[in-house]
Amino acid sequence: MSYHPAGNSFAVTAGSTSWPTQPVTVSSCYVANPFYGDDDQAGPETTIDVLFKPVEAVKLRGSLRGLVIRCADSDEAEHVKASLPAVDWKGLHVFMLQSPDLHQPDYVVSMAVGWHEGVLPRMRQSFFGGGILPGDRWNPTPLHGVGAGLDMAPAQELLDALRADEYPPRRRERHRHVFVLMARYDRADGPTVSGVGVFLTEEDAEEARALYASGIEDCWIEVLPVAV
């Protein structure tokens, strides 16, 4: 994966730029079909991931159509600094986010910004999420440990998905947690770990665990995300 440190500015001019509405350190911009071959047919959808790191302050809209990220000029930087008197500005920069939708640009205060463009797999939330290590669970957020719950699907959305006759492939950017009852059995060929059941509420999972605990000494509940 390549990482491109930004210079004074760079532009995203196609498609609609969708940003999370909470202050986070990664944001994704989806640019639909920017590549065309000789036959003028659209190529694969690509994603531009923009990473600000580390983020000290954010003023950011929920969505933008077209985007230019640039360093703030001296007047803009002084205005932002005056509005954030408690910030220690050592090593920090003000990056302005411009869009035709905005009368005044938004901003991000951080030490650096960079970007990566490529075809992002449907079940991967960001190029900057890091590699998958043995024992890792599916990460429903762009970065490990990042998320304010705004990508949490309501229970009804999960139930509707379970009832649907068809579930066409698409990006899975929302999730709902379920409670998986696990148990370890001693068998002739050695101990075996197996899933016992999946429950929508912790109360149901705990009640089932109590039933199994009477006959199986080692059983526990794992909380796992379900992609919706």
Image (cartoon, helix red, strand yellow):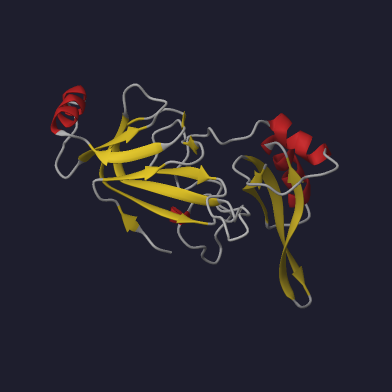
* Quadrant in the rendering for residue 52: top left
The image position of residue 97, as x and y in percent, is 33, 34
Outermost residue to the right = 165
- Left or right, 85 with respect to 141, comes to left
- Left or right, 75 with respect to 37, comes to left
| Vertical order, 220 against 65 (above or below) | below
Nearer to us in this view, 32 or 142 = 32
The image position of residue 172, as x and y in percent, is 63, 45
Nearer to us in this view, 111 or 162 = 111
Nearer to us in this view, 8 or 128 = 8
Question: Which residue is at 69% across, 32% downward?
Answer: 155
**Residue 97 visible (yes or no):** yes
The image position of residue 92, as x and y in percent, is 19, 41
The image position of residue 76, as x and y in percent, is 19, 28
Nearer to us in this view, 172 or 146 = 172
Question: Which residue is at 67% across, 47% downward?
Answer: 170
| Quarter of the picture holding the N terminus | bottom left
| Vertical order, 136 against 223 (above or below) | below
- So how many labels did they put on this image? 0
- Left or right, 24 with respect to 217, comes to left
**Residue 144 visible (yes or no):** no
| Quarter of the picture holding the C terminus | top right
- Left or right, 60 with respect to 174, comes to left
* Quadrant in the rendering for residue 68: top left
